[in-house]
Amino acid sequence: MIEDTHLIELKGVSRTFGTTQALKDINLYIRKREFVTLLGPSGCGKTTMLRIIGGFEYADEGQVLFEGKDIANVPPYKRRINTVFQKYALFTHLNVYDNIAFGLTLKKMPKDEIARRVGRMLRLVKMEGYEKRGVDSLSGGQQQRIAIARALVNEPEVLLLDEPLGALDLKLRREMQLELKSMQQQLGITFIYVTHDQEEALTMSDTVVVMNHGCIQQIGDPKRIYDEPKNAFVADFIGESNIISGVMIRDELCEMFGQEFPCVDEGFAPNEPVDIVVRPEDVMVVGEDVGQLTGEVASVIFKGVHYEMMIRTEAFAWKVHSTTMQPVGTRVGLTIVPFNIHIMHKAGGQ
């Protein structure tokens, strides 16, 4: 269960490399026992933020607090934080047991305590019986499990994970997403995870931090991030969206393509220009005579669990996901219920 205690806080954190500002005035808190994912495209600043938390980079401005204390001058090995890197960084000259035990051996911990902790980690990552195997003989997924076990055996309060599933194939990556979430819940520690993969973020996280160009775009739980994107970048980056320029006529009524559509959004100025977001799965294909809009099916792709259709109306090409397919060239109607229309302020607006 997530505690409401702020374990880590970043206050006004900025970082510049040469002429590139990697982070711009970042303010963020992370709670105890929380699974937080930093999500965004390459170069958005998410790995820089992770490295600053871990002590591998420093902030040019701002503070990094751990339980309320500034840790800017605390070296990585003295922070109650461990890191799993994308390339795992396992010691190829050591077997599985010695890789996991490495940090405990450096601390000169008694051998029986090392054996107890290593045994527990091997059970946790489902690698019992592999103690004497060389790490080079393991698959990518097995190496990743050992890297996680090596980080967790030191019993950190926070585990940082920098795109640790990037080298795995799709099926194994999906399995490991569930494994990581299960481990985090069993251990009850804070995970801070970096990825550019939206599915990973939505699958595992308690909280998603969406980033772009060194700034935080939105913070929220996965459902809120998906259902209520704060701006066009978030809407486009998280899943797929139809994004249309429109006008908010008044509360609960918008206009797009010169036609009025009921919605559920409030708090906009009368006749304010807005961006309107409709997810592909929220557009209903109906008969041409009953639709709010009419158009023609331009293309159909089978995606496994649904069909993806591009349906061209007079003013816009709609991306539609449906479990039933309409052949190319078919004239259809489109209907969108008010709850499935999401209104956003224009960038730089209110």
Image (spheres, rainbow, N blue to C red):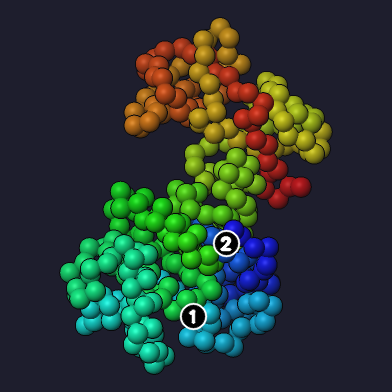
Name the secondary structure under disc 2. loop
User: Quick check: can you spot residue 68?
Assistant: yes
Earlier in the chain: of badge 2 and badge 1, it is 2
Q: Quadrant of residue 228?
A: top right
Residue located 58% across and 9% down the image: 290
Residue 60 position within the rendered picture, expressed as x and y whole percent measured from the top left:
61, 80
Which residue occupies 49% across, 80% down? 56
The residue sitting at 17% across, 69% down in the picture is: 137
What is the distance, in whole Å, between disc 2 and disc 1 at their CAs? 22 Å
Q: In the rendered structure, which amino acid carries the disc numbered 1?
A: Phe
**151 or 347, which is in the foreground?**
151
Residue 205, given in percent of the width and then of the height, sits at 52, 54
The residue tagged with tag 1: helix, strand or loop?
loop
Is the residue marked by circle 2 packed among few (<14), some (14-19), or many (20+) residues within 10 Å?
many
Residue at the image point whose x is 62% and y is 52% from the top: 220
* Residue closest to the eye, 321 or 150: 150
State the residue position of label 2: 34
Residue 108's place in the image compared with 346, above or below, is: below
Q: Which mark is residue 68?
A: none
The nearer-to-camera label among 2 and 1 is 2
Residue 304's place in the image compared with 40, above or below, is above
Write down the residue under mark 1. Answer: 56
Residue nearest the viewer, comparing 173 with 186: 186
